[in-house]
Image (cartoon, rainbow, N blue to C red):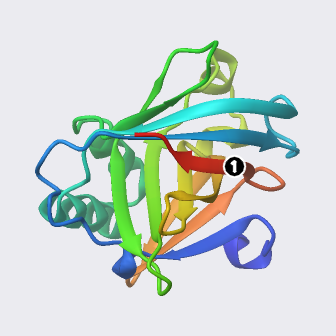
Amino acid sequence: MRALTQALVATLLGVAVMQAPAAAQKDVKEEFEAILTNISNVGAAGLTPVSIRITRWTPDDENERLLGILRKDGQDAFLRELVDVDPVGSIGTPVSLRYDFFYAREGRTDDGGRRIMLISDRPMQMWERMQAAPSRDYPFTVLELRLDKEGKGTGTLAQLVQLRLVGNILGIENLASAPMRLQEVKKVR
């Protein structure tokens, strides 16, 4: 299996530890700022300031339904269902339009911090859709934040991602040489 043989481009996240906050049904207004550092083989290299907004958490019932689809029917069916739910937040730069995320879950770390995971589809170029480009099989963007008690930390942003669910482990395979890094992450609201 390709994901297991490429240790540098595959990451495993425990889905079981990602819980919806008690107020998952209520509106959330959280905003984070970070510096996106890209030294991978995907996208433009450099440093870019980004804003990450979370407006709601994926509730438990929606989470179970979506992950059940991923487990049973695979990532293509999961993608169709994912983009059909209400957005949970977005990411943007000072010179770009915001791009919506459709899945947001949060978990607590042992030291009292937070781990947040956001998932979205991935914008694709027309040539990518028309040709049989290998990247077409990697339709997701996954963002992960690791924050301390004060809301500061680091994170990653992986584009060109495939998803698999084996038991309660979400397997993330990244076609890029490495995920982009989110540095100087801080909660601003």
Amino acid residing under circle 1: Glu
Q: Residue at x 61, y 23 (%)?
A: 93
Quadrant in which the C terminus appears? top left
- Image x and y of residue 165, in percent: 43, 72
Q: Is residue 4 left or right of residue 146?
A: right
Residue carrying label 1: 184
Work out whether residue 76 or residue 169 is closer to the camera in this orientation and state it: 169
Above or below: residue 9 compared with residue 87: below
- Image x and y of residue 45, in percent: 88, 33
- Image x and y of residue 18, in percent: 36, 72
Above or below: residue 139 compared with residue 105: above
Tell me the crowding category of disc 1: few under 14, some 14 to 19, or many 20 or more residues within 10 angstroms, Cα based.
some
Q: Is residue 103 left or right of residue 162?
A: left
Tell me the SS state at disc 1.
strand
Q: Residue at x 64, y 62 (%)?
A: 173
Above or below: residue 184 compared with residue 166: above
Q: Residue at x 47, y 69 (%)?
A: 149
Above or below: residue 163 compared with residue 167: above
- Image x and y of residue 78, in percent: 34, 52
Q: Is residue 162 left or right of residue 109?
A: right
Among the 4 quarters of the image, the one containing residue 168: bottom left
Work out whether residue 96 or residue 42 is closer to the camera in this orientation and state it: 96
Quadrant in which the N terminus appears? bottom right
